[in-house]
Amino acid sequence: MQRIFQMDGEETDCWLGHDGSRFVLNTPTGAVACQLDPTGLPGGYKLRAKGVVRELRLAVGPEATFVHMDGRTYEVGRVDPAERLAGSDGGASDDRLVAPMPGVVVSVAVKPGDAVEEGQPLLVIESMKLETTLTAPRDGVVAEMPFAEGDSFGLKDILAQLAPEEE
Amino acid sequence: MTISKLLVANRGEIAARVLRTAKARGLATAVLRHVAEQEGPAHLIADEVVMIEGPTPVAAYLDIPQIVEAAKGIGADAVHPGYGFLSENAGFVAALEKAGVTFVGPTSEVIDLMGDKVRARAFVEERGFPVAPSAIEDDDPASFVERARAVGYPLLIKPSAGGGGKGMRVVREDSTLETEIETARREGERYFGDGRLFVERYIERPRHIEVQVMGDGQGNVVHFWERECSIQRRFQKIIEETPSPALTPEQRDEICETAAGIARAVKYRGAGTVEFIYAQDGAFYFLEMNTRLQVEHPVTEMVTGFDLVAEQLRVAAGDGLSAVQADIPQTGHSIELRICAEDATADFRPAIGNILLLDEPQGEGIRVDSGILDGGKVTTDFDPMLSKLIVHGPDRAQAIARARSAVQSYVILGVTTNTGYLDAILAHPDFASGDVSTGFLAEQSETLTAPGEDVSDLLMAAAALSDERLVSDVMQIPEMYRKMGGWRN
């Protein structure tokens, strides 16, 4: 069965199978035979894969799995490709900027109709006393800037919308 | 006067920390909680929880009439303000006084004096304590630019009403002085509603060293040694330690005695901190005095063995200081790490989420002052600091080793935190040698956020095998198809 995993903004397409005695995760770079056994600690597991055994702590959230391993914490986003295809997304995800947290718009640098380049600043927001500049995710044309300077917005509100890319 | 019932007008880890000491001293205790706020450790410790309301949770904690009413309503005879919120608000102190409730802290006059950076600086300078060369606009606005020039470059422009680094500008060349002054004025107006400025000599590669003091309000003051707080991001401290690796024993005595002298000059009451800028050549200058308990006070408690909240409560009850200077040791080394819900790889963007699994480190020389509970929710309603990890060791190297092992074993799953970043700082050779300045984190930002070993295959395997739906779907496929490695070409 297929899963897409997201780490540090990158997606990896994987397929989980079972060869009769163990699970095999097929990744773009190869097949990984793997086994996960609980250790008794809350969220504690022993992972066997790629010839190593690692003790880890793990928690499964609705959209991501959090893993604490060798003193570091990682977040692995999970996407079921079937759900993504059937998803009710009103456009491709790189068409818009979604608020990473609630906050206030400090300034708006572009207006609908403006042509923008990837990385170009679109607006500055302030959340929890920190100012963050949000930039265009790709080259394109601004379709909508729903918030003006001084407006408050909520988590996951759309802060900027680019026109769909022409095929 | 005696104190029998204490209201803690704060939340999070500091409320829990103050409540623990108050309970241990036999006081009845109460704490505030906003109606929309998650349950935290403080609510489980306090005998009583008083619900407060406001347009935002933060506004509720700043609502003086409501909090004074809350204190009176439950019959509290004293209020501990913690840090932040109303802890340095002279109006709050006056309102409590009027209501006959003891404020655990200094007088409103001292809070007023030290809260005004310009007045505080003048007060300290007049009494012969060291301050950096400076020029204050208010002294004579017409000659401000000229006087700023005379301070010499590089210089630092600061809003008089400022704090937290907002509106501060470094000027290195005379040609940009006037435009930078105008920019700083606009920022001062925007952030603080006050465009008055002052400039002072900018100290290159400075350290931030502060001294914990405690006074009885009668002129008796002791210090509890220094804290080194140079590890800052965006002017916010994230790692503090004591002793400072920069000071010789003679310098340590000098800076600590200077701090105690400043506190004596105002007949300081309660716990306070005198902050200094420490230059590479060993000179130090008064920066400001914080008239409250600091976030980083636990490192002081670890090396002195004193409970600073207990000292605060003693002084507030009129029982005076429990120790003279000679009784206050500085034993071993202590380090505090501020665990924050933020993404160090994305410009310290605050993170939110549900805490799905929490397992705090424990063991010899490890203390955790936490404001979160397993299953809780991290929102952006409050500061991103979730907890503090404090360690103690016989010397600095052992304290660093203990801090690394503790932060690596700190499990917080469900929200992004800075534990990996803190560990990277502790592992940095410059931190180990103690050769850091307040610019360290900015200078080393790439090294400190570099990705570690690529373990993505292991992580994906763990994520796949712990995905119950995925595993059950795989096992429902007839065996001969299950074995196939997908339909990849």
Image (tube, coloured by chain):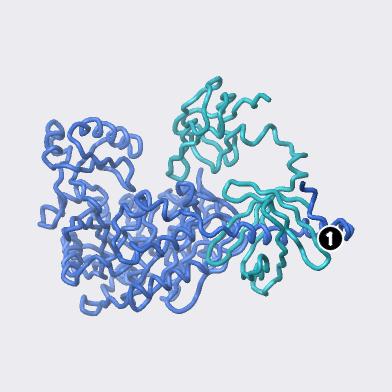
Chain colours: A cyan, B blue
Describe residue B407's horizontal placement relative to residue B237 as left or right.
Answer: right
Q: Residue at x 29, y 37 (%)?
A: B194
* Image location of residue B214, percent across then percent down: 26, 67
Residue B484 picture quarter: bottom right
Q: Is residue B438 above or below residue B244?
A: above
Which amino acid does the dot numbered 1 rest on?
Answer: Met
* Image location of residue A163, percent across then percent down: 62, 25
Number of numbered tags placed on the structure image: 1
Q: Is residue B259 visible?
A: yes
Q: Which residue is mark 1?
A: B475
Instruction: Identify the image quadrant of the C terminus of chain A.
Output: top right
Most extreme residue toward the front, as rendered? B489
Q: Residues within 10 Å of mark 1 (few under 14, many from 20)?
A: some
Given residues B130 and A70, the one toward you in this image is: A70
Q: Residue at x 56, y 63 (%)?
A: B373
Q: Is residue B1 visible?
A: no
Question: Disc 1 sits on a residue from what chain?
Answer: B
Describe residue B388's horizontal placement relative to residue B186 as left or right.
Answer: right
Given residues B267 and A112, the one toward you in this image is: A112
Q: Residue at x 63, y 49 (%)?
A: A6
* Image location of residue A84, percent across then percent down: 73, 42
The residue tagged with tag 1: helix, strand or loop? Answer: helix
Describe residue B15's horizontal placement relative to residue B122 as left or right.
Answer: right
Most extreme residue toward the top, as rendered? A113
Q: Is residue B368 above or below residue B92?
A: below
Q: Residue at x 47, y 71 (%)?
A: B405
* Image location of residue B378, percent across then percent down: 55, 54
Q: Is residue B322 above or below residue A19?
A: below
Describe residue B133's horizontal placement relative to residue B386 as left or right.
Answer: left
